[in-house]
Image: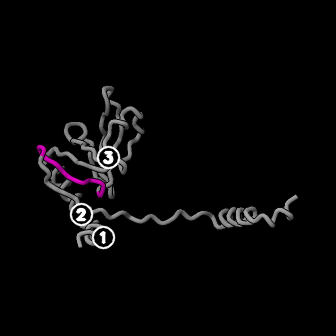
Amino acid sequence: MLENVIDEKGFAHIMKNSIQDVIIHFFEKEQNFGILCKIEEVEFNPMLPQSINDEFRPLTLFFLAGYTFDTAKIDGDDLIFEAGFGSDNFGSVVTVPLLSIIQIIIDETPVFINLSIYKERKEPQKVAEGDKGVKDSMASFLNNPENSKFLK
């Protein structure tokens, strides 16, 4: 089934590498392009004002041309570029995970479509054993009403 393919780690790896190869090719050819991406996975530094954030749709198109194209680079698994937003041209460095790119577009025509929906399952953050154990133990102790006799 299609779901078994598009939600598979190996397929996601192929898509990520293909996205990277296409973007690098466009960098080398100095070809401006757009990316349609999942805005929830995009980071802005500095963060954008809420009034600008509210204008974004779940799938947002960024067009890389001019200064934005000149600042664009791939760093690890991310496409990074500088851009200005809103009427005041608020500047921010935009970090887009490659796998959050759904389409790469030239002249309003998609030249690449990423069908992968795989999400890396993040390992739970490990808390220092001493801290977590004490907190869990104390919470369990306090949740038992019969232990109230031990508290003064």
Say whether disc 1 or disc 2 marks the residue closer to the N-terminus.
1
Q: Quadrant of the N terminus?
A: bottom left
> In the image, residue 25 lies at what x, y percent?
16, 54
User: Image height check: is 71 above or below 51?
Assistant: below
Horizontal side of residue 24 vs 140, given as left or right: left
The amino acid type of the residue labelled 1 equals Glu
Q: Residue at x 24, y 48 (%)?
A: 36
Q: Residue at x 23, y 70 (%)?
A: 2
Gap in Å between the C-alphas at discs 3 and 1?
23 Å
Residue with the mark numbered 1: 8
- Please rate how many residues cluster around mark 2, counting C-alpha atoms within 10 Å: few if below 14, some from 14 to 19, many from 20: many
The amino acid type of the residue labelled 2 equals Met
Q: Residue at x 56, y 65 (%)?
A: 126
> Which mark, by number, is residue 58?
3
> In the image, residue 63 lies at what x, y percent?
21, 41
Q: Secondary structure at mark 1?
A: loop
Numbered range of the magenta stretch: 99-108
- Predominant SS along the magenta part: strand
- Please rate how many residues cluster around mark 1, counting C-alpha atoms within 10 Å: few if below 14, some from 14 to 19, many from 20: some
Residue with the mark numbered 2: 15
Say whether disc 3 or disc 2 marks the residue closer to the N-terminus.
2
The amino acid type of the residue labelled 3 equals Pro
Is residue 40 within the magenta segment?
A: no
Q: Secondary structure at mark 3?
A: loop
